[in-house]
Image: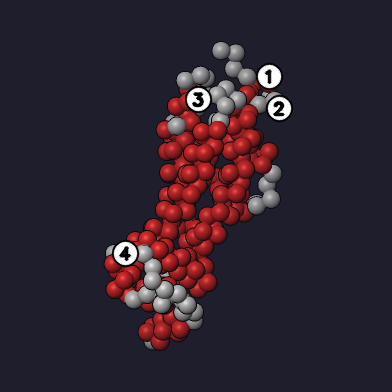
Amino acid sequence: GNNTADTSVVDAVPASDSAAKRLTGDERRREILAAVRTVSSELGVSHLSVSAVTKRAGCTRSLFYHYFADMDAAVTAVMDEAIDGFISELEQWNANRTVGDIEGALDTVAPLFSELPSTLTSSSGALYGGFLHNVVQRVAQYICDTTVVDFVAHHELRIDHVYETFYTLIMGLLMYIRTHPDVPDETVKEIIASTLHIEGYTAKYPERKPQN
């Protein structure tokens, strides 16, 4: 029955060759998370189990439970790592922006969003679809708390429902770019600019620039 199927799936997972290595707690936790990513991408999320992950990581079940309450907690940690990486890139982008250079900011943020679907897929494998909301929620909130605050200090914000607009924009971009990976950065830039009604700050639409 099911037990046989589960056993065969675990048997299909290659054992880790690092079992004998002495690892720190952080290193061991990272290896377990790496195993979650590997098993999910190789066998599919439906085959994620503590047995398969611990075999791949070369650790005991008790050690797995030392770090994670259950598999859901481990999956969440994998997701959080991927999101943290993108937020770090956004923080760097935010710090390097030139005040008032809206087109420059758009030019540099568009490639970040263009690369995000492949970045998330490579870092979380088959888990991608399950945590789009987490990604979008955190990215939208980060932008609202930082970039938007900076913008309204110098310019009129011409959108209502600011968080909701960014959430919808980011979710739409991720879904579109994932299915159209060759979309040019310039197109992504224009989608962002027109959705936020800031295309008047770009060279393409000078006639739309607010007069205030």
Alpha carbon of mark 1 to alpha carbon of mark 3: how far? 20 Å
Reading the image, the residue beneath label 2 is 204
**Residue 94: percent from the left, percent from the top?**
51, 34
Instruction: Name which residue lies at 31% across and 71% down.
Output: 63
Viewer-side label of 2, 4: 4
Label 4 amino acid? Answer: Tyr
- Does label 3 or label 2 sit earlier along the sequence? 3
Residue 135 in the image: above or below residue 93: below
Instruction: Name which residue lies at 54% across and 37% down.
Output: 93
Alpha carbon of mark 2 to alpha carbon of mark 4: how far? 52 Å
Alpha carbon of mark 4 to alpha carbon of mark 3: how far? 41 Å
Reading the image, the residue beneath label 4 is 67
Alpha carbon of mark 4 to alpha carbon of mark 1: how far? 57 Å
Label 1 crowd bin: few (<14), some (14–19), many (20+), radius 10 Å: few
Mark 3 lies on a secondary structure that is helix
Residue 112 in the image: above or below residue 6: above
Reading the image, the residue beneath label 3 is 151
Reading the image, the residue beneath label 1 is 207
**Residue 35: percent from the left, percent from the top?**
45, 69
Instruction: Name which residue lies at 41% across and 77% down.
Output: 20
Mark 1 lies on a secondary structure that is helix
Label 4 crowd bin: few (<14), some (14–19), many (20+), radius 10 Å: some
Label 1 amino acid? Answer: Glu
Viewer-side label of 4, 1: 4
Label 2 crowd bin: few (<14), some (14–19), many (20+), radius 10 Å: few
Label 3 amino acid? Answer: Phe
Alpha carbon of mark 3 to alpha carbon of mark 2: how far? 20 Å
**Residue 108: percent from the left, percent from the top?**
61, 37
Residue 212 in the image: above or below residue 33: above
Q: Quadrant of the N terminus?
A: bottom left
- Does label 4 or label 3 sit earlier along the sequence? 4
Viewer-side label of 1, 3: 3
